[in-house]
Amino acid sequence: MSVIPEDGPDGCFGTTECTPDGSGLTFIRLSDTHGYAVRRGEVNVQVLGGLRVGKSPLRQAAPKARPVTEEELRRVLPPLRPRDTVERFRQWLRTF
């Protein structure tokens, strides 16, 4: 899955096939992958798989795909490491 901003490159740029497939989905084929793209607000979400992956699972996944939220990122990613010396020292002190 990938997210492309609205002002980014056209979702069909560089594809060998790019055809509307109903329900807001667009089927895209590249040289070694294929899948579907769907518009989500200000971004296009693409769900791609290798050529051995069937079109049906990709078509089912695309309408459910969405960009990750800030809250989901905060839950999954570790906190940022402090950049300045004072903040690193404070963090080190908190470990005791």
Image (cartoon, rainbow, N blue to C red):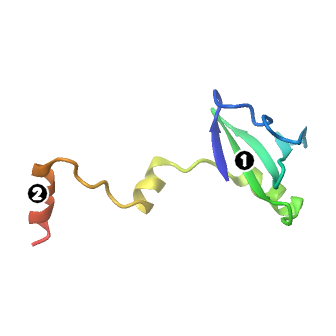
Side (left or right) of 84 relative to 60: left
Element type at mark 2: helix
Q: Amino acid at mark 1?
A: Gln
Please tell me in which quadrant of the rendered image residue 41 appears. top right
In the rendered view, would you say 31 is above or below 26? Answer: below
SS class, disc 1: strand
The mark nearer the N terminus, 2 or 1, is 1
Q: Is residue 57 above or below residue 36?
A: below
What is the x, y in percent for residue 19?
A: 91, 39
Q: Which residue is mark 1?
A: 46
On the image, the x and y values in percent for residue 34 come to 83, 53
Name the amino acid, label 2.
Answer: Arg
* Front residue of this view, candidates 8 and 60: 8
- From the viewer's perspective, tell me whether residue 49 is left or right of residue 78: right
Q: Position of residue 27 (x, y in %)?
A: 86, 45
Residue at the bottom extreme of this rendering: 96
Which one is nearer the viewer's eye here, 85 or 75?
Answer: 85
Which residue is at a point 82% across and 63% down the rendered structure image?
Answer: 57
Q: Residue at x 83, y 55 (%)?
A: 59
Q: Position of residue 11 (x, y in %)?
A: 75, 36
Residue 89 figure quarter:
bottom left
37 and 81: which is toward the camera = 81
Mark seen at residue 90: 2
Above or below residue 94? Residue 88 is above
Local packing at callout 1 (Cα closer than 10 Å; few below 14, some 14-19, many 20+) is many
Q: Residue at x 68, y 52 (%)?
A: 65
